[in-house]
Image: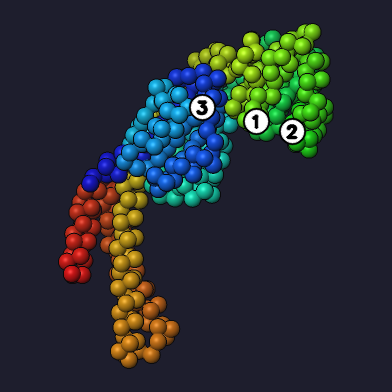
Amino acid sequence: MGIDDYLNKIRALTLNHKRVSTITLSETYLNSDEIYGKLMNYYNEVFLLQTCNRVEVYIYGDDDSAVEDVYRVKGTINYVDKLTGIDAVRHIFRVAAGLESAAVGESEILGQVEDAFNDARRRGALGGLLGFTIERAIRTGKEIRSRFPEISIGLASIGSLVAEYVHRVRGLNSRITVVGAGSIGSDIVRRLAEKGFRNITVVNRTLDKAKAVALRYRLRYASIDSLRSIIRDSDVVIFATSAMNPLLHRRDVEELSSKPIIIDVGVPRNVDPEIPGVVSIDELKNLENEIREGKKKALDEASRLIELRLIEYRRLFARRVIEGMMGELTKWGLSVGEGEVKRAVKAGLIRSEENGAALAVKSTAKKVMLPLLMYLKELAEEGKFDEALTIISGIRAKLNEDGK
């Protein structure tokens, strides 16, 4: 096997805003517990990334049919892009850098990738080569944001898109209700306050969270139980929660004497799809297009840097593969040494395993293996992966032959 054989085990099945609407994405939203529970029966490593712009599943394996079944059940398999190897790696690098978002350069996505990464690690779904890949993507995303702050200037987050939209269609005295006090909801409140809006009510299922966000800007807050009465006195209602069921139904709107502007950026969708005229991410994309040209140079430079980081990644990936193989050989060497100590104890050559003999054997084995490990790592990083693999294969063959 060459390095590409290992690299091509990285697979990504992506459904995103470029192929489908936010309604379809919302309908495809996956239950994390169920997905990890199912896919970890098929793959050693799994990574699930879900935002308002995407539903993506990454695996390390030879066959992605189990992941296909997940999308097939949701009825969206025909819109899924399948990426393998360096194409899959490039995609997650660009996603983490904010270059694949509906609002290019948005600031939330890097944190969302990190949160998803930490969640997958807690579940025991990452830890090998796929985990290494996501780590490198996060590192690259942070570097992009540090070196090219221009990509985040302007409408760089969902919150800023929403605030700019509201600013364009309503005056500063408008009565605004923000439903949701999580990361996106609190960012929307902050962006609105920065633009000068003060007549804002923060609504959340957990009242303490709504209070914490509202008091930062001296705003009002309320429980979700009073949502319908608050909407009656609102000019704009913004939904930004992760509720699994709609919080606003068509009949609720039909009962209103005057209909407010309704904006839904929740994941999954917070508003009944049957309600007409709801502003979603799809409509907010137009604002991003207006400032895209101003970001073009920085975005081009960011894309070029990602390509350089992918070249570096390929070298480091080869090194990690070799490290894994050598780790297996080192374990074998240690087990042989431990066996020899036990035989020496049994033969009466030493009194017990606790007199330092076992420790000395382990230390010796590691010291003997270390120069070889460093040499093989260097070969892998220099692009001589096949040569390193040949050496390891030869060692394995010799060990198997001696063990017969």
Crowdedness of circle 1 by 10 Å Cα count: few (<14), some, many (20+)?
some
Three-letter code, disc 2: Arg
- Residue 86 visible from this viewpoint: no
Q: Which residue is mark 2?
A: 205
Decide which of 361, 156 is in the foreground and name it: 361
Q: Residue at x 42, y 85 (%)?
A: 355
Dot 3 corresponds to which residue? 28
Instruction: Say whether disc 2 or disc 1 marks the residue closer to the N-terminus.
Output: 2
Classify the position of the C terminus by image quarter.
bottom left
The mark that comes first in sequence, 2 or 3, is 3
The Cα–Cα distance between marks 2 and 1, rounded to whole angstroms, is: 10 Å
Residue 54 drawn at (x, y percent): 50, 27
Q: How many other residues sit within 10 Å of disc 3, few (<14), some (14-19) or many (≥20)?
A: many
- Relative to the observer, which residue lies in front, 202 or 137? 202
Disc 3 element: helix
The residue nearer to you, when weighing 253 against 325, is 253
Q: Is residue 207 visible?
A: yes
Dots 2, 3 in contact, CB < 8 A: no
x 40%, y 77%: residue = 359
Question: Callout 3, which amino acid?
Answer: Thr
- Cβ atoms under marks 2 and 1 closer than 8 Å: yes
Residue for point 30% across, 53% down: 322
> Which colour scheme appears in the figure?
rainbow
- Using residue 231 as the reference point, say whether residue 392 is left or right of it: left
Residue 73 location, x and y as percent? 45, 29
Residue at the spot of label 1: 243
Quarter of the rendering containing residue 272: top right
Tell me the element at label 1: loop
From mark 3 to mark 1, how far is it between C-alphas?
14 Å
Task: Give amino acid for label 1.
Answer: Ala
When asked about the image quadrant of residue 383, the answer is top left
Above-or-below relation of 351 to 139: below
